[in-house]
Image: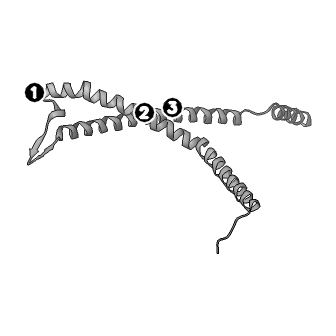
Amino acid sequence: MAKTIDKEELKKAKKEAKKKLGKTTSEFKEFIMRGDVVDLAVGVIIGGAFGKIVTSLVNDILMPIIGMLIGGLDFTHLSIDVLDAKIMYGAFIQNILDFLIVAFCIFIFIKIINGITSKIKKEEEEKEEEEEEKKSEEVVLLEEIRDLLKKQSK
């Protein structure tokens, strides 16, 4: 026996589905707009562009120089034929150089940022210490009154 759904039940089911969809949509919007996700997206985009720059540096500048120094070798075409397979170890060497250059650039970048942030923190700590050492006007006035009272009592 087939169950029939009346119009009221159908409207109710549609309302519930819209409500759940609206909640899911709002949760998704909240997730996307969180700072971490946006920062991550920016980092991935900038990282991709930085990777292209480093690849160009390696391919177009460093590798030709290295090739000239070692006798005119072009690393990109270095390969070994094994049966029907062609093993492109030159491209592998180039990718290793890419990685090392990217890692070194990131290391230097982080080192610079850490130096700047530690300098800023140090300056802030010095300002806080100076503010703690400074006495408020009320304390200075009270100390003067105390000293005057001591003189009068002698």
Who is closer to the viewer here, 26 or 108?
Answer: 26
**Circle 2 residue:** 109
Say which residue appears at 85% left-offset and 35% top-offset.
Answer: 142
**Circle 1 residue:** 71
Measure the alpha-carbon separation of dots 1 and 2. Answer: 34 Å
Q: Position of residue 109 (x, y in %)?
A: 42, 33
Q: Which mark is residue 116?
A: 3
Task: Give the foreground label among 2 and 3.
Answer: 2
Measure the alpha-carbon separation of dots 3 and 1. Answer: 43 Å
Is 106 positioned to the left or the right of 98 in the image?
Answer: right
- Dot 1, crowdedness within 10 Å: few (<14), some or many (≥20)? few
The reply to whether residue 111 is in sight is no
- Dot 3, crowdedness within 10 Å: few (<14), some or many (≥20)? few
Is 138 positioned to the left or the right of 123 in the image?
Answer: right
- Among the two numbered marks 2 and 3 on one chain, the one whose residue lies closer to the N terminus: 2
Quadrant position of residue 66? top left
- Among the two numbered marks 1 and 2 on one chain, the one whose residue lies closer to the N terminus: 1
Measure the alpha-carbon separation of dots 2 and 3. Answer: 11 Å
User: Which amino acid is tagged 1?
Assistant: Gly
